[in-house]
Image: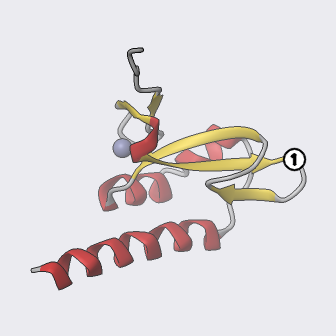
Amino acid sequence: MSQHPILRRCVACRQLLDRRSLWRVIRDHQDGVRVDGGMGRSAYLCQREACLEEARRRKRLQKALRCQVPDDVLAALEQRLRNATDVTAEAN
Ligand SMILES: [Zn+2]
């Protein structure tokens, strides 16, 4: 069986990428905007500082989800980026 990657478009750079390599931000019907899990409208974002900044500056997640996105959602993604960078730095 061939495994086609499921492609999703980053809301910042507009590239189509494998869904597994993107962050998923969901406007959950009950819990509001969340990262990774939930039921509802989704927006995808590259795990890159440039795309995170672009999304923050131009309110791309807000536009894609058609709602307000709390600062802590963006802060959580930024933290993940930091953690990932730290791991890389330690490996060097
Ligand atoms: Zn991107």
Query: Quarter holding the N terminus?
Result: top left
Task: Describe the colour scheme in one phrase.
Answer: secondary structure
Name the residue at 32% across, 57% down.
48
Image check: 59 left or right of 79? right
Image check: 70 left or right of 2? right
**Foreground pick, 42 / 11:** 42
Q: List the single residue furthest toward the bottom.
A: 90
Query: Quarter holding the C terminus?
Result: bottom left
Q: Could you say where residue 43 lies in the image, as x and y percent from the top left?
A: 59, 41
The residue identified by callout 1 is 29
Q: Could you say where residue 40 lies in the image, as x and y percent from the top left?
A: 77, 39
Q: Amino acid at mark 1?
A: His
Image check: 76 left or right of 16? right
Image region (quadrant) for ligand 1:
top left
Badge 1 density bin: few <14, some 14–19, many ≥20, Cα 10 Å: few
Residue 31, placed above or below residue 27: below
Q: Could you say where residue 10 lies in the image, as x and y percent from the top left?
A: 44, 38
In the picture, residue 32 is in which quadrant? bottom right
Label 1 residue near ligand 1, CB within 8 Å: no
**Foreground pick, 42 / 70:** 42
Residue 86, placed above or below residue 28: below
**Foreground pick, 23 / 61:** 23
Residue 51, placed above or below residue 39: below
Name the residue at 21% across, 74% down.
88
Name the residue at 44% across, 71% down.
80
Q: Could you say where residue 20 lies in the image, as x and y percent from the top left?
A: 44, 42
